[in-house]
Amino acid sequence: MLTVLRKSPTAVSVLIALLLLVVILWFRSLGVFQTFSLTAYDMFIRLNARQQQSVPPIVLVRVTEEDIRARGEWPLADATLAEALGRMAVGGARVIGLDIYRDMPVSPGSEVLDELLLRGDKIIAVEKIGTAASLGVRPPAVLAGSGRTGFSDVVIDAGGVVRRGLLFLDDGDRVAYGFALQLALRYLRTEGVYPQPGTPDPSWLRLGTVTLPPLEANDGPYINVDAGGYQVLMDFRDGAAPFVSVSLSQLLEGAVPAGLFRDRIAILGVDAESVKDSFYIPYNIRQGSQRSVPGIVVHAYLVSQLLRAGLAGEQPLKSFSQLLITLWIVMAGVLGCLGGLWLRSFLKLAISGVAGVLIILATSYVVYNQGWWLPPVPAGLAWFGCAGLVTAYLSTYEHIQRELLMRLFAKHVSDDVADEMWRHREDFTEFGRPASRKSMATVLFTDIEHFTTVSEKLGPQALMEWLNEYMEAMANRVIEHGGVIDDYYGDAIKANFGVPVPRSTESRICNDARNALHCALAMQAALVEFNERCATRGLPRLRMRIGICTGEVVAGCLGSSKRMKYTTIGDTVNTAARLESYDKGDFSIEDVTVACRTLVAGSTLKYIDKEFSLEHVGELMLRGKESKISVYRLTGAAVTNVTPRLKEVS
């Protein structure tokens, strides 16, 4: 396993992506992303807000701060409540909701209010369910046991936002109905719609054709939420301000349009800063400026949602199984990983990452419009995180690899060869260093004739300057012709044509051999120019020998991790070296125009066609060889102009 990971950055990238996916899924199971998921849910609600084609059959009567000041009383007297409720009933309201606690009488007018509540069977009053930390608030005494009360308890998420509605609560003694549910059921009853057992679970509530399953701990944008009681996810589909409303003063002064309450649900409640009955909803928390809405608005949204389910058959938002959600997140991570493997660029990552996240958001939103919740946040994190980590890893890995390769080769090859090496790095790298392997190559050795004798005539500084000038001229010719400088041996140079990128075709091997011979001719011409410059400065002239052989070599790195050298070894290398040094004493040409002897092994001839002028030297026994080899001397190119370095054929 470790060997595979060391050899394959792709395998490491996949492992990194898998580990990140495990972390994301684990964090999701802990609810780490719930806040962000709720934010996405709120955003979808705002995007999906209806353009009001029909107004919900609900009218709100708000007791405002101005109403309280004008009447000079709080709490409102029973007589005031009775008058307001009476006007709403006379106005034709089908159901009336009293969202003001009245557990104790507030004189004057208590008898009038009690009588109105007793005979007004369309009126629903609120109570508050007691808890371990709160005694709760009882409904009006005259309505005890009447079935015309409902609790006004509201479920609040972290951040103070209401997204869930309570339909039922079981306090141990009784099953209590929510205030909004009571209003909706009374209205639906007049439309012939009654609560029925749901499907597939008969304990669920069904209104008309729509079953309202209770919210589970991991439904919708929630993870491990307290789903006690019978909760439903509120959809707020009616828009940001869908409800008709009037103030208490307008109602009591008769300043309301005729027929405003007819066949509607009318809810009387408080909308005043001095009375703390306000909440945040998804429409009121954007852009950082939070503005709360009164409790009657929250109840109205839930009532409207229940009416739409019972009358129009609107289904509640459904959640996919946890398995499908996990597959959705994993799929996003896999695509992100593949993107990182393909992109390998932070700029492309930024562009595609943003595009991918937008696609995930758009997909989730489209699915949301179809009535399903598909969490965009963990999927977006999986996409962007996997793509980012894979890109970062590959970028770092490639930077290290490129640094290693360039440290080994950059000063010894041309730019286009260096680029080719990088493009084909996977073909010849292994375990973070160039791999050792057999390859067909042409090896060139060159050495200065009688260098020791010549060097004795110069001082140390002059000698080094003179030798460096020569070396630079020769090394440049190697690089220009696509060779790789293997090493400098004092005054000698070893160059390889055909490494480190392995040659897989005959045409490429031929290109390497021809490039090596063209390089030898270019070095000879450069030597003539060098000698002419030396003559003008009174410096010694040079002569050199070159040996060239084509064949199989073993190419790889020698040395430690701190000091490595890429080189070639094998019989081909030895043959080229022996050709360069063959019969040194016999090389005594005085003609400076040909102050270079180039011997070429017969194995090279089959790769160079007829581009060069060669003289057959004979069948020679080279030092260290067990049999003779055919040797030729390069005398020039067969064409008038020397062909430049041949481009590699892919």
Image: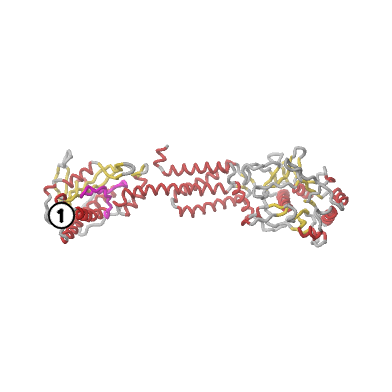
Boundaries of the magenta span: 479-504
**Is residue 634 toward the left or the right of residue 287 in the image?**
left
- Give the tally of numbered discs: 1
Q: Is residue 488 found inside the magenta-colored segment of the image?
A: yes
Q: Quadrant of residue 257?
A: bottom right
Front-lying residue, 590 or 237: 590
Display coloring? secondary structure
Q: Is residue 197 found inside the magenta-colored segment of the image?
A: no
Q: Residue at x 16, y 42 (%)?
A: 622
Q: Quadrant of residue 566?
A: top left
**Is residue 623 toward the left or the right of residue 405 in the image?**
left
Q: Is residue 18 visible?
A: yes
Q: Position of residue 389 (x, y in %)?
A: 47, 47
Front-lying residue, 602 or 174: 174
Using a 10 Å C-alpha cutoff, classify the residue at mark 1 as few (fewer than 14 neighbours), some (14 to 19) or many (20 or more): many
Q: Is residue 605 visible?
A: no
Q: Position of residue 621 (x, y in %)?
A: 15, 42
Q: Position of residue 536 (x, y in %)?
A: 16, 61
Q: Residue at x 18, y 47 (%)?
A: 580
- Mark 1: secondary structure: loop
Above or below, 351 against 23 in this view is: below
Residue that label 1 marks:
595
Q: Quadrant of residue 128?
A: top right
Amino acid residing under circle 1: Ala
Q: Position of residue 391 (x, y in %)?
A: 45, 49
Above or below, 90 against 189 in this view is: below
Q: Residue at x 42, y 37 (%)?
A: 1
